[in-house]
Image: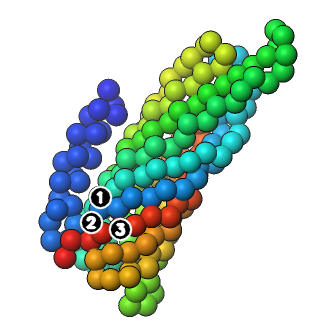
Amino acid sequence: MKLKLFSVLVLLMSSFSVAANGYVGFSYGSTAVKADLTSIGGNTLDDTTTLTRFYGGYRLHKYLAFEAAWFDLASVSVGQLGTGSTAVSGYVDMKALGIYGVALVPLTRRVSAFVKAGGASWDADLQVNNTTAAADGFDALYGLGVSYNFTRTFAVTADWETIDSPNPEFSTYSLGFKWEFK
């Protein structure tokens, strides 16, 4: 329910991205996932998987923007470990919606560094053998990155982000593209 309510807020905010100072973007990269599955009969899952992020934002001025993003964070599975009655398989699937402020620091005419801070509503599905569990929450989101503008409206970005969730834990690294409406 929290994720649905938060989705509506994110969609309302992203509607501003068509304004004169709005932007949209896409990133692809990797997520390092660590999940404690002991509560449902498993062990600790520690793996790396792919990340997809779609985002939109509104730039208030040269140094400050607000952004909303949808993250497909992790789909990690571990096949059968062990044999017989001690065999274990595990799975984690996590998605999130984030909203945060972005502080931008122009380094040159084309290169900018940025820092992000805000929050994210996330859902995770956990499974060990035939036992499933769900986890969700709203936690702090923070990150940093750099962008290079090829043109006035098109940039390539490199980001590191994390949502400070207790279980599963993850951090992301991604490369992407951003289109600004000017």
Using residue 14 as the reference point, say whether residue 133 is left or right of it: right
Q: Quadrant of the N terminus?
A: top left
Residue type at numbered disc 2: Tyr
Query: In the rendered image, which residue does mark 2 sit on?
Result: 23
Per the model, the C-alpha gap separating discs 1 and 2 is 5 Å
Sequence order check, earlier mark of 1 and 3:
1
Using residue 161 as the reference point, say whether residue 22 is left or right of it: left
Residue type at numbered disc 3: Lys
Instruction: From the viewer's side, name the closer residue of 148 and 96.
Output: 148
**Residue at the left extreme of this rendering:** 19
Per the model, the C-alpha gap separating discs 1 and 3 is 9 Å
Instruction: From the viewer's side, name the closer residue of 123 and 142.
Output: 123
Give the label on residue 56, or none.
Answer: 1
Question: From what the image shows, is residue 151 above or below residue 134?
Answer: below
Using residue 93 as the reference point, say whether residue 35 is left or right of it: right
Q: Quadrant of the C terminus?
A: bottom left
Q: Quadrant of residue 9?
A: top left
Q: Are marks 3 and 2 in contact (CB under 8 Å)?
A: yes
Q: Are marks 1 and 2 in contact (CB under 8 Å)?
A: yes
Q: Which type of secondary structure does the marked residue at label 1 adopt?
A: strand
Query: In the rendered image, which residue does mark 3 sit on?
Result: 178
Classify mark 1: residues with Cα within 10 Å, few (<14), some (14-19) or many (20+).
Answer: many
Q: Give the image location of residue 139, x and y in percent.
A: 46, 43
Q: Which type of secondary structure does the marked residue at label 2 adopt?
A: strand
Give the residue at x 33% y 31%.
2
